Amino acid sequence: MQVHEQSIRGAQVVDFLAHLLRHISGKLLVIWDGASIHRCKALKRFLAEGGSERIHLERLPGYAPDLNPDEGIWRYLKHVELRNVVCADIEELRYELRLATIRLRQKPDIIPGCIAQAGLTL
């Protein structure tokens, strides 16, 4: 998980997708919402220059958080793993979030449950 203090720009999305291509073999399915950074010129150029050979992008409908598994994962992190956490600063929050995501990875039913709750199948 990456935490950014500023809004993510299109170039960072392209960098992330390129990172996935370098580290994961085979075809990739990327599911995301309709944020403007997911439709930027840099991304369109990246896909046109070969990125789309292995990456299939599936866009969720706009304004449909109930169909986005990320929302369930964030809800779980906020209301379960970080429920009573109080941090003195952003660095402590980053640390606690990292610990929460490590605990989440130890619970194999949560992420598939969020995917199923959104009406999707693996």
Image (cartoon, rainbow, N blue to C red):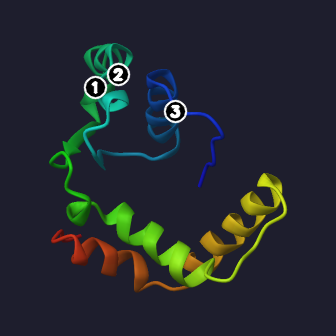
Residue under pointer 1: 39
Query: Which image quarter: residue 14?
Result: top left
The foreground one among 110 and 72 is 72
Residue at the image position 73 percent from the left and 58 percent from the top: 94
Query: Which image quarter: residue 96?
Result: bottom right
| Circle nearer the viewer, 1 or 2 | 1
Local SS, label 3: loop
The foreground one among 24 and 103 is 103
Q: Which numbered marker is on residue 56?
A: none
Amino acid under label 1? Arg
Residue at the image position 15 percent from the left and 71 percent from the top: 119
Residue at the image position 33 percent from the left and 26 percent from the top: 51
Local SS, label 2: helix
Amino acid under label 2? Leu
Q: Which comes sooner in the sequence, label 3 or label 1?
A: 3
Q: Is residue 78 left or right of residue 111?
A: right
Asked if the residue at tag 2 contacts the one at tag 1, i.e. Cβ–Cβ closer than 8 Å, the answer is yes
| Image vertical order of residue 32 relative to residue 7, above or below | below
Local SS, label 1: helix
Residue under pointer 2: 43
Asked if the residue at tag 1 contacts the one at tag 3, i.e. Cβ–Cβ closer than 8 Å, the answer is no
Amino acid under label 3? Ile
The foreground one among 56 and 86 is 86
Mark 3 vs mark 1, CA separation in Å: 13 Å
